[in-house]
Image (cartoon, rainbow, N blue to C red):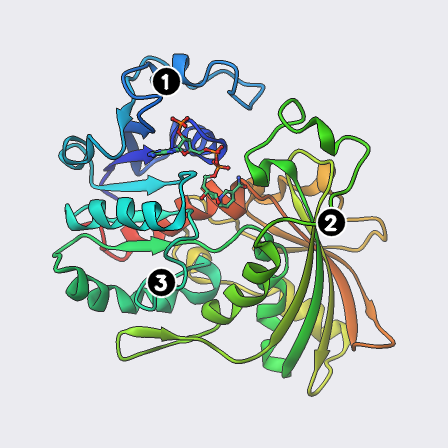
Amino acid sequence: MKTYNVAVIGATGMVGQRFLLLLCSHPWFRVTALAASARSAGKTYREAVAGKWAFDCQIPAGYADMTLYDAERDAEKIAGKVDFVFCAVNLDKEQTKRLEEKYARLEVPVVSNNSAHRFTPDVPMIIPEINADHLAVIPAQKKRLGTKRGFIAVKSNCSLQSYVPLLHPLKKFGLLRAAVCTYQAISGAGKTFDTMPEILDNVIPYIGGEEEKSEKEPLKIWGSVENGEIRLADAPVITAQCFRVPVSDGHMAAVFASFRDAPSEREILDAWVSFRGEPQLLVLPSAPAQFIRYFDQPDRPQTRLDRTEGNGMSICAGRLRRDGLFDYKFVGLSHNTLRGAAGGAVLLAELLAAKGFFD
Ligand code: NAP
């Protein structure tokens, strides 16, 4: 496989830092530019993240002394140095859309963690194991943008990665509806225990905008490509409550599901453990060999013990049992800054590279 040069836009943030940890030893992708806001531009990476480097390990050698670009002002310079960019910025929706479209129009593909373009009809929102076929809308998007190689592809919100991958293999049993309650880590808000002390000994039953995303985004992921756009699915219907809990990383979900023809427990377990998506078939570098890992122990998965399963890219499941109100209930777990953010974006970029979208 050839290697591709990449920039990380938003490199100083929680997700940006994760990108650098994942990319420092990546076999296909080489970071040749780092960018953030005008506040960080001109500083070395080490200076810009002083006091906010969120990991126990050192900043990877090779990045610490790189000088940060201003993502907006220096876009042309960055475009000249890279084959594509990862984008994870803390900006409002309109500013984020403008920034991402600026790079796409400079003929640089954008692999985004941001929510701004998730409901743009010709922008694919991808969980690589589930809807790789949605990449088929990219030619229509390029036509709209007037580009030859520039486009935007996004990953979904982190919360739903703890339950949509588990519901997806069950759709064949006539999945009608699901109720989910998520227990989400503070890194999902770009925070650590130092920067979010109010979470200690506490649960906060509100995460702005999260429940709407958790209910609506799955319908785009399960949608179909029609006339150069993604048409949203109208089922299965999901209702969600999202809580912030005092854990550093890892989003857990309690899930209840109803079916038209309820399967047996054995059928559900078989559907989970045998499920493979394109990343497994293509043996992409970040793809977990086992996408869904089921735990038989009654007290697993646990956030701290199991969030790094499959290098943080597997989805953990457990506690599958019959329910008196719905048909079944179970627990899901995924790592929010790995599978749910930087890792999911790297896997999406690997899928795009393998399918020739960066050439
Ligand atoms: P964060 O820790 O607050 O970092 C924000 C980043 O955006 C910083 O690098 C910041 O640079 C940069 N930035 C701010 N204004 C900018 C501008 N005008 N131009 C360029 N860069 C600018 O946020 P985060 O948690 O990493 O999240 C980043 C994005 O990923 C958000 O859209 C978030 O919703 C999404 N996301 C996060 C998670 C998660 O688990 N954390 C999961 C999925 C998706 P400075 O340091 O210079 O200010």
Q: Earlier in the sequence, mark 1 or mark 2?
A: 1
- Name which residue type carries label 2: Pro
For the N terminus, the image quarter is: top left
Q: Is residue 231 left or right of residue 207?
A: left
Residue marked by disc 1? 45
- Name which residue type carries label 3: Pro
Coordinates of residue 111 in the picture (x, y in percent): 33, 48
Q: Quadrant of residue 241?
A: bottom right
Mark-to-mark CA distance, 2 and 3:
31 Å
Identify the secondary structure beneath mark 3. Answer: loop
Coordinates of residue 276 in the picture (x, y in percent): 51, 63
Q: Is residue 217 left or right of residue 175?
A: left
Residue marked by disc 2? 205
- Name which residue type carries label 1: Tyr
Identify the secondary structure beneath mark 2. Answer: loop
Residue in the picture at 40% in, 14% down: 46
Q: Is residue 185 above or below residue 277?
A: above
Q: Is residue 310 above or below residue 194?
A: below
In this orientation, which residue lies closer to the viewer: 119 or 109?
119
- Identify the mark at residue 124; answer none if there is no mark: 3
| Neighbours of disc 3 within 10 Å: few (<14), some (14-19), many (20+) | many
Q: What count of labels does the image hold?
A: 3
Identify the secondary structure beneath mark 1. Answer: helix
